[in-house]
Structure formats: structure tokens, C-alpha cells
Amino acid sequence: MTLTTEQLTLEAWSKGEQVFLWPGDQLGGGFVASELPVGWPDAQLRNIVQPYVRVFRPDNPNGRNLLVIPGGAYTFISVANEGLDVARSMTAKGYTVFVLVHRLPGEGWDQRSEVALQDARRALVLIGEMATTLGTDPSQVHVIGFSAGGHLAASLATRRVDRGDGPVLRSLGLIYPVISHEKQIGHALSTQSLLGDTPSADMIALHSPAEHVSPDTPPGFFVHALDDVDVPSENSLLMVRAMHAAGRPIALHLFEAGGHGFGLGDPHLPVRQWLAFYCEWLDRSDTRPKSAT
């Protein structure tokens, strides 16, 4: 029997080691499963009862850890183009990759606006705890996020609570990220899914990563297509301006065409080059922790 492309994707996805983030009694309550529409793609995950990471190991490890956060407007997790494809490419370059499948705010959870960030923080803790077993360097932890996953990655990098959040991030990669919640700039579905129908001004400010950039925010790498009508490039520019004002290192790549949700990018367009630029940037950047003085 010949497998479909989606079946092959799910088979490859299942080969990554699944590591659950929390014991069941620490998840909190309120989860409500929803019936999926007919024909809903299996690679767009919903009804996340137990959040987890899929761990993909390289054949020739370089010691670096990469936390990948796929997008999906906080309503699903797009594990094919923004998860598995990225994991394949980055393990080929020596990275140990952790793809995050976090709780979805709109699925009934208590503290809806915080559950995804709680899961991302917990994933960092696990990466640190697993470093010895995996043979990776716990001081070399990088995060990359796509679309709403970019919003979560930016929140993870700018809203640290204490050292209990896990290893310090050495870099932040944001690929067509949602940053703003303003009309005409942000992404309405992502905002509604995360914050509900009538969020307060304080809630919006808390969940606006550009307002929380500090001198401790890790160096940032940004990619956006100028023809992205779903999440305008102004989102990346907002974050870039905030990081520049804070004196943080940044690399920004704007492409004429690519649209939204392109993952690794159309091989026939220049946007396909972004991953090579990203890997070169990681290699050039001095992301090692500074020696104590």
C-alpha cells in the first residue's frame, strides 16, 4: 500500500521521542475536547490533552539544543511545515531539536492566556534536565517560533520569571511572528484564541512581547515576507525596533514574496534562503554565556 504524503509525515513525526511536559495532576483543569471538522488535517494538532515535546536527535550532534514552536493561531499546532520539516533540516546540521506541542488556550483550560507559556517554560526546564542524557550543552539553548508560535517564543524570551524557568536562551528566532494585538497589525484569531473576546488593556499589554524587551533579551533573528496579508511584517518591525532600542543584537530579513505560513519556504523563491541565513547567523553569533567576573 502506498502511503499518502500526510501519512508519511505523521509516520516521520511519530519517530521523534515523545516526552510529556507535566504529570497529570499539575496540568490544571477545564480542558474541553472539541469535535474536529470533517477533513481536518491530522498534522494540524488540536485537543491537546497532555502537552509534550518531540525530540529529534542528529547523527552528528554539535551540542546545541533548538526548541521549535510551530504556529497555528493558538487554535492548532502545525507540526508538518513548521515542526517536522524544520527538525529534519536542523538535525542535519547537528542540532538536537525539541518540537513543542503546547496546550491551546481556547480548549477550556484554566488561566487560558498562560497555559501555552507555562508549557514553553516547562519545555526549557526539560531541555536542561535532558542535556546530560542527550549529550548536549545546557548553555546552548535556542528557540525559534513561527506565526503564533513566534508570539509564544517571543513571550518566552521576554517574560522570564526566575531561574526556575530553565536554561537561559542564547538566541531567539522569529519567523513571520505575531507580535501585536492591534487591529490592522496583529492577527485577530490569534488574539481571540489567546485572550478571549474582550481582553483588558492590561491583559493586552502583558501579552505584547515588544513591550517587555530588556537588555537581557537574547539576540534575535527575524524573517518576514512583505506580501504577508495574514500577519503583516509590521509585527516583526515592532519587535526589531524594541530590541534595537534596548541595544540587543538583531538580524532582519524581509522578502518581497512568500506570503504567510511558508515554513522552509517555496524552493522557487528567494525566501527559501532564510534557513541558511539563520544557521550562518547562529554560527557567527557569540552566543556563549559570558564568563563570571
Image (tube, rainbow, N blue to C red):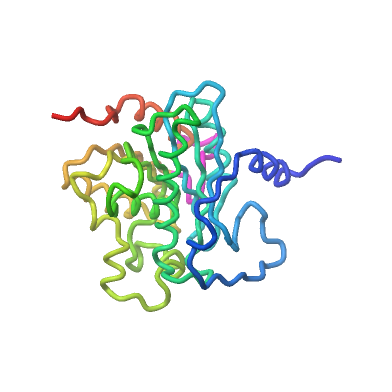
Residue in front for this viewpoint, 235 or 279: 279
The secondary structure that most of the magenta stretch takes on is: loop
> In terms of image quadrants, where is residue 168?
top left
Residue 10 placement (x, y as % from top left): 68, 45
255 in relation to 75, above or below: above
159 lies above or below 198: above
Q: Is residue 45 left or right of residue 6?
A: left
* Residue 259 placement (x, y as % from top left): 48, 49
Quadrant housing the C terminus:
top left
Residue 260 magenta = yes
Asked whether residue 189 is drawn in magenta, I would say: no
How many discs appear? 0
**Residue at image coords 21%, 41%:** 248
The range drawn in magenta is 257-270
Spot the residue most to the left.
293
Q: Is residue 2 left or right of residue 85?
A: right
The relative height of residue 94 versus residue 27 in the rendered view (above or below) is above
Residue nearest the viewer, comparing 104 with 125: 125
Tell whether 176 sits left or right of 266: left
Q: Residue at x 66, y 67 (%)?
A: 36
x, y percentage for residue 150? 40, 51
Residue for point 32% across, 67% down: 182
Query: Which residue is situated farthest in the bottom direction here?
Result: 198
Asked if residue 211 is positioned above or below residue 244 in the image, the reply reads below
Residue nearest the observer in this picture, 97 or 92? 97
